[in-house]
Image: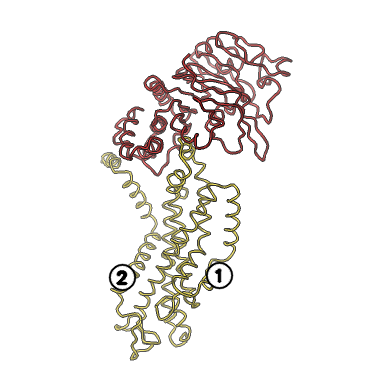
Chain colours: A yellow, B red
Amino acid sequence: MTVVEDASVDLVSPRARRRRVIRRRLARRPGAILGFAVAATFILAAILAPVIAPYSPSATDFDSLLAKPSWDHLLGTDELGRDILSRLIWGARASIQAGVLATCLAMAIGVPIGLVAGYYRGWIDPVISRVTDVVLAFPFLILAVGLAAILGPSLLNATIALGVGAAPGFVRVARGETLALREEDYVRAAIANGAGDATIIFRHIVPNMSSTLLVQATVTIPAAIIGEAVLSFLGLGVQPPTPSWGVMLADAQSYLSEAPRLAVYPGLAIFICALAFNLLGDGLRDVLDPRTTR
Amino acid sequence: MADTLLDVRDLSVRFEADEGRTQAVDELSFTLGEREVLGVVGESGCGKSVTMLSLLRLLPPTAVVTGSARFGSLDLLAASNAQLKRIRGREISFVFQEPMTSLNPSFTVGRQIGEVLQRHLGESRRAARARAVELLDLVRIPAPASRVDEYPHQLSGGMRQRVMIAMALACDPKILIADEPTTALDVTIQAGILDLMRDIRDRLGTAIVLITHNLGVVADIADRVIVMYAGRKAEEAPVHELYEHPQHPYTIGLLGAIPRRGVDRLQEIPGLVPRLAEPLPYCAFAERCPRADHRSRSEVPQLREVRPSHLVACFHPGSE
């Protein structure tokens, strides 16, 4: 029977077979599955916030200030009587938005620069590499705080600051991959067939580094999520009354002794969300990077 | 001989790296006629690949190339990058040694063959795909209509080399330069590839330059053979002439190293190909040559015609 099964494997289209290989490898990594499930839950919560949040995030209920968890308010209420669960769900919006958009921005800035450095080399490569090293010498959060302070407080500016701060990581990855890929035999063969720079970069280099970039992205997203919380906590990101995990943490400071849960819930949300994306990223790296699979 | 397609004169290639210079090719001249199959033979490092790559400026920027290479009305070595881009893959095509890694793993073979057609002939994607199927059929890949949509990792080494040949032939080039096309393949697959190349020459009239270290391969397919040693031409002759009356001691050594029935032990040539920083002022083979004398060690032997259309660069030529 196994023979018949093996024969049927070959009839499946190559993409389907590759997908199945990836699924099978993923199945051996429960951490990655868990990370994927939790990250997906957060993303869904962010998208569906208006539908699933039991209350409006800014609706105040002055009859129950700092209420303990109950059936009315599953996670209790804050100092203004706002439902904490609803605020957490709405807060996921700011976090996911900042995480994903900042990562996209970092990729949009970093990848072209890295490609230019790695592909053309010459004088431009050391210039780009040194500038990248200088920027990477600053801790990511310090850099983002500095940029956000210059740009002024708002979610958009915080996202831009995080994106610019994360761009050097993409420069480095894209440059390294380009340096390696441009020495591949198929790039040499393409040049011998008359391919120009644009063809080589966009058809031979970029598609073959996409999985590495995907992994770098899944590492950048949790960093940007934490970054958004930090900026909002410091008042450089989302502005109250708009809910954000960082804003909630900041508000909770004054009530730390009476109602520590006000700080615990958003803190847990940040922790779990970042952990989920990190687990997913680790799993994807193992699955997509042929060098780490036997 | 038919009209000359490619006329290379005094080609020298030198690599200027930080670690020092290397003289890879030293004043090499040769011609290639239409429909001709030219074998270029020599050990690793003798400059045979570098010679061919230098013609289309495919060497790294550290290479300094001098001389001339007339192709039609154009001197390839003096051509602009834009002119060369139109020639690469269109007029002169390459097939490389490593079929396993010479195809882009992210695209189907059909797309990759089509890419060349779209670029040089401006064909539509649909037309390019249809032509890709024809080309796969031409290089004798079974079931080309389904193979065209497969990815490189689904094909064997021999298949991939056929795909590379199909890609090289896509624009019906005048010259096909094959650099050790069979070296990475099994012996049975090798025979098939050589068979295919002979067939291509007969059917399409493509001139072929076959670079190899294997004189057996050359005997199979070439019309004329150039034996290179340390960046210089040691001997040049029509293939049968070369096998029946080898003149240069190096050629004789190479022929002795071909496995044959009834010969228990292969003759090796002692020593290694020298790596040169500068052109040697004497015969480069002298160190390893049983016939070398004082003159070999003090003068560069010039090429001379010892038999009809048989050139040798040796002071002491002769079979055995």
Location of residue A37 (image quadrant) = bottom left
Q: Chain of mark 1?
A: A
Q: Residue furthest front?
A: B73
Residue A69 percent across, percent down from the top left:
35, 83
Residue B92 visible: yes
Q: Nearer the viewer, residue A215 or B30?
A: B30
Q: Residues within 10 Å of mark 2 (few under 14, many from 20)?
A: some
Q: Is residue B222 above or below residue A201?
A: above
The residue identified by callout 2 is A48
Q: Earlier in the sequence, mark 2 or mark 1?
A: 2
Q: Residue at x 50, y 68 (%)?
A: A161
Q: CA distance from mark 2 to mark 1?
A: 33 Å
The three-letter amino acid code for the residue at tag 2 is Leu
What residue would you read off at disc 1? Answer: A142
Q: Secondary structure at mark 1?
A: helix
Chain letter of disc 2 in the image:
A
